[in-house]
């Protein structure tokens, strides 16, 4: 899955959200709207595709940390159907790869009580593993247009996660130059870059708030 989803990055670097204020949402609002908030890792996907693009099906996740849950299973199913702005599809890990980790905001599927679907505002924020084995939100944050001033909470972070590395071909030149200029990426190997900043999940939990995380 290409990282051209980083299109809002230029606005984020300028200190403005990547969408109009009326279209942004806070972490607290997301948590309040969600039936399930978890840190989870992709185990497998089962999508129907057209021209190699998923158009319906499910992703299966292993729950690592439940933040808002009631009787959460160890493995959860996240279903999506159709193509739309905030679609909830995920890349399938390769045979020798670990699955990506995400902070998920999900609602119960009205068509099947055993599975979940994404919120209209979006469903997932990328989470990476730092060198001290802690979990951090990748910064810049993409996937959901957030109103929280996350730049105030981002800290220099050394990552031990392969998903912290991005190929040059997956970044538009203006994105790469803006992030490089802001110190958000640095050269890793020829033709590749690595992220340099993150936001601790402890901070993200504080921003969500205890009341919003009540099941």
Image (cartoon, rainbow, N blue to C red):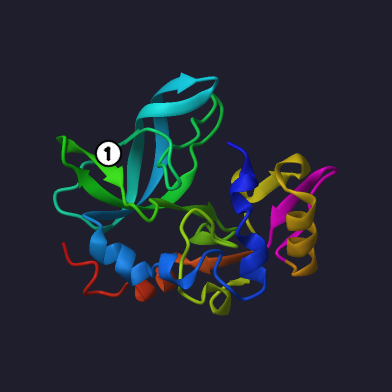
Residue at the limit of the structure toward the bottom, as seen here:
152
Describe residue 173's horizontal placement relative to residue 92 as left or right: right
Q: Is residue 194 magenta?
A: yes
Q: 98 or 199, which is in the foreground?
A: 199
Pick the quarter of the image with the C terminus: bottom left
Q: Position of residue 3 (x, y in %)?
A: 63, 45
Residue at x-position 54% and y-position 61%: 141
Counting from the top left corner in percent of width and height, residue 92 is at 49, 30
Task: Point out residue 77 in the picture as x, y percentages from the top left corner.
Answer: 28, 35
What's the residue at 56%, 27% (across, down)?
96
Quadrant including the N terminus: top right
What is the crowding at mark 1: few (fewer than 14 residues within 10 Å), some, or many (at least 20)?
some
- Residue drawn at x 75%, y 50% is 193
Q: Residue at the far right: name it.
A: 190
Q: Which residue is mark 1?
A: 76
Q: Using the image as rendered, state which of residue 33 and residue 92 is in the foreground.
A: 33
Q: Is residue 43 left or right of residue 194?
A: left
Q: Secondary structure at mark 1?
A: strand
The quadrant holding residue 157 is: bottom right
Please give the range of residues in magenta.
Answer: 184-196
Residue 33 located within the stretch drawn in magenta: no
Vertical side of 147 occupied by 170: above or below: above
The reply to whether residue 161 is visible in this rendering is no
In the image, what residue occupies the spot 55% across and 32% down? 97
Q: Position of residue 10 (x, y in %)?
A: 68, 63
Q: Is residue 4 visible?
A: yes
Quarter-of-image position of residue 13: bottom right
Image: 139 above or below 46: below
Residue 117, relative to residue 195: is it above or below? above
Instruction: Please tell me how many numbered marks the rendered image carries.
Output: 1
């Amino acid at each position: 899955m290409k990282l051209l989803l980083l299109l809002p990055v230029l606005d984020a670097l300028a200190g403005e959200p990547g969408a109009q204020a009326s279209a942004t949402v806070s972490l607290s609002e997301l948590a309040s709207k969600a039936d399930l908030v978890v840190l989870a890792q992709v185990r497998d996907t089962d999508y129907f595709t057209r021209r190699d693009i998923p158009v319906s099906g499910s992703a299966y996740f292993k729950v690592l940390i439940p933040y808002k849950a009631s009787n959460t299973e160890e493995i959860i199913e996240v279903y999506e159907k159709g193509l739309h702005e905030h679609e909830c599809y995920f890349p399938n890990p390769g045979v020798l790869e670990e699955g990506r980790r995400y902070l998920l905001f999900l609602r119960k599927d009205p068509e099947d009580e055993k599975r979940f679907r994404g919120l209209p505002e979006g469903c997932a924020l990328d989470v990476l593993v730092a060198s001290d084995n802690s979990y951090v939100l990748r910064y810049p944050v993409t996937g959901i247009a957030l109103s929280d001033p996350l730049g105030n909470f981002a800290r220099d972070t050394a990552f031990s996660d392969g998903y912290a590395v991005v190929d040059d071909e997956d970044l538009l030149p203006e994105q790469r130059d803006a992030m490089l200029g802001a110190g958000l990426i640095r050269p890793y190997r020829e033709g590749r870059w690595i992220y340099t900043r993150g936001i601790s999940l402890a901070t993200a939990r504080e921003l969500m708030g205890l009341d919003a995380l009540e099941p």
